[in-house]
């Protein structure tokens, strides 16, 4: 299985097996045609733009990784930044709908909605502009032929980093910091708890939610509480709020404590770096939103936008992985994580996503 340090990509063919190529019908529309097939092969006319969620483009995580994917797509096709590909920042939830509507009115060939918080906005704009191709990450918007829904098996990757946490902890207490409690973030939580218990049945997993994806201070405060009450490894799935975890972990390590952070979405090794290039980041759950954005944008460019379809990325197509940057993971941890990864691939382990599935897991 390829690791983060290796070049990985989801082949276009594997994506197409998940989704029949769809194209929005030209029904009643208030906007101009945004079909990728109408640029007559002239890449210079193609436009791909994304709307960030509240964490912003420099969240060191989900939005930033999505933008890296869009930039990679632009570079690969000789497109010009700002003119052909760009992003629009959302400062508040009220910005989602007007931002997406503005892109639709411009005739953007593919508009990206980064995050499940935009579900309602995508549905509204998608219904109003039936020729506008919109792709949303982390949720499913049904019954719209011009909307592609991109999802991931976050629970699988969270399980793997849970294995690392369960093997690393010296106190048999580990923590989880969630952003906004939701069906999506529950996948991270329950997969992580299952991974911890798979290798350390005696460990306690303490869960707290920041109820924010944008407040690093809230994340730091929760990390402080979790460390103070005995946790020595903490995993976050909290966007920009989770960056407070690294601040608290670095402070405590500098004070001589043996504590660790686990990153999310992209390799967050650098977020944990302190003096002498050491890092408090044990590993990260890598969710290849960059690859998804690049591949689906390519499909739109080729006139094969998968409107009306749900594309799910998991371990089997390198959509989910874990980071091995640095040498904080021991060889024993990597061996165990790879072994569990193979069991997941072989169908021997079905990682829980919900509270009910986790309870069943614990009772098996």
Image (cartoon, grey):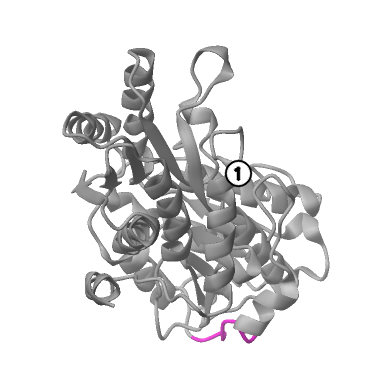
> What kind of secondary structure does the magenta stretch mostly adopt?
loop
Q: Tell me the residue at 79%/52% (across/down).
A: 76
Residue 182, image x, y percentages: 25, 62
Q: Tell me the residue at 54%/29% (across/down).
A: 270
Seen in the picture, residue 167 relative to 146 is either above or below; the reply is above
Q: Tell me the residue at 33%/40% (across/down).
A: 234
Residue 189, image x, y percentages: 31, 57
Residue designated by label 1: 331
Quadrant containing the N terminus is: bottom right
336 lies left or right of 300: left
- Number of residue marks: 1
Residue 186, image x, y percentages: 29, 62
Taking depth in this image into account, of 120 and 267 the one nearest to the observer is 267
Q: Tell me the residue at 17%/32% (across/down).
A: 225
Q: Is residue 302 visible?
A: yes
Q: Is residue 321 visible?
A: no
Q: Is residue 323 magenta?
A: no
Please state the extent of the stretch shown in magenta in the rendering.
Answer: 19-27
Q: Is residue 25 magenta?
A: yes
User: Which structural element holds mark 1?
Assistant: helix
Seen in the picture, residue 143 relative to 210 is either above or below; the reply is below
Mark 1 neighbour class, 10 Å CA radius: few under 14, some 14 to 19, many 20 or more:
few
Seen in the picture, residue 4 relative to 120 is either above or below; the reply is above
Which picture quadrant has residue 155?
bottom left
Taking depth in this image into account, of 208 and 175 the one nearest to the observer is 175
């Amino acid at each position: 299985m390829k690791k983060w340090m290796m070049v990985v990509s989801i082949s276009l063919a594997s994506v197409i097996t998940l989704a029949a190529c769809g194209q929005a019908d030209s029904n009643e529309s208030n906007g101009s045609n945004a079909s990728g097939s109408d640029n007559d092969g002239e890449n210079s006319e193609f436009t791909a733009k994304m709307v960030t969620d509240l964490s912003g483009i420099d969240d060191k995580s989900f939005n930033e990784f999505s933008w890296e994917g869009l930039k990679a797509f632009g570079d690969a096709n000789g497109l010009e930044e700002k003119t052909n590909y760009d992003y629009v920042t959302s400062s508040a939830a009220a910005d989602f709908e007007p931002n997406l509507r503005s892109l639709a009115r411009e005739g953007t060939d593919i508009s990206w909605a980064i995050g499940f918080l935009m579900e309602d906005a995508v549905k509204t704009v998608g219904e109003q502009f039936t020729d506008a191709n919109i792709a949303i990450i982390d949720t499913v918007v049904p019954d719209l032929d011009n909307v592609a829904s991109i999802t991931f098996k976050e629970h699988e990757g969270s399980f793997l980093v849970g294995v690392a946490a369960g093997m690393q902890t010296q106190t048999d207490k580990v923590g989880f910091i969630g952003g906004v409690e939701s069906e999506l973030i529950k996948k991270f939580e329950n997969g992580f708890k299952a991974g911890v218990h798979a290798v350390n049945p005696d460990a306690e997993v303490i869960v707290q939610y920041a109820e924010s994806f944008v407040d690093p201070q809230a994340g730091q405060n929760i990390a402080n509480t979790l460390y103070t009450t005995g946790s020595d490894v903490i995993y976050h799935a909290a966007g920009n709020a989770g960056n407070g975890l690294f601040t608290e972990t670095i402070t405590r390590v500098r004070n001589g404590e043996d504590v660790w952070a686990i990153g999310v979405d992209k390799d967050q090794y650098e977020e944990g770096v302190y003096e002498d290039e050491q890092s408090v980041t044990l590993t990260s759950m890598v969710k290849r939103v960059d690859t998804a954005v690049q591949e689906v944008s390519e499909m739109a460019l080729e006139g094969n936008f998968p409107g009306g379809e749900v594309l799910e990325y998991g371990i089997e197509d390198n959509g989910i992985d874990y980071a091995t940057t640095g040498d904080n993971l021991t060889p024993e941890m990597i061996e165990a994580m790879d072994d569990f990864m193979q069991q997941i691939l072989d169908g021997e382990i079905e990682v829980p996503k919900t509270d009910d599935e986790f309870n069943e897991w614990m009772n098996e």
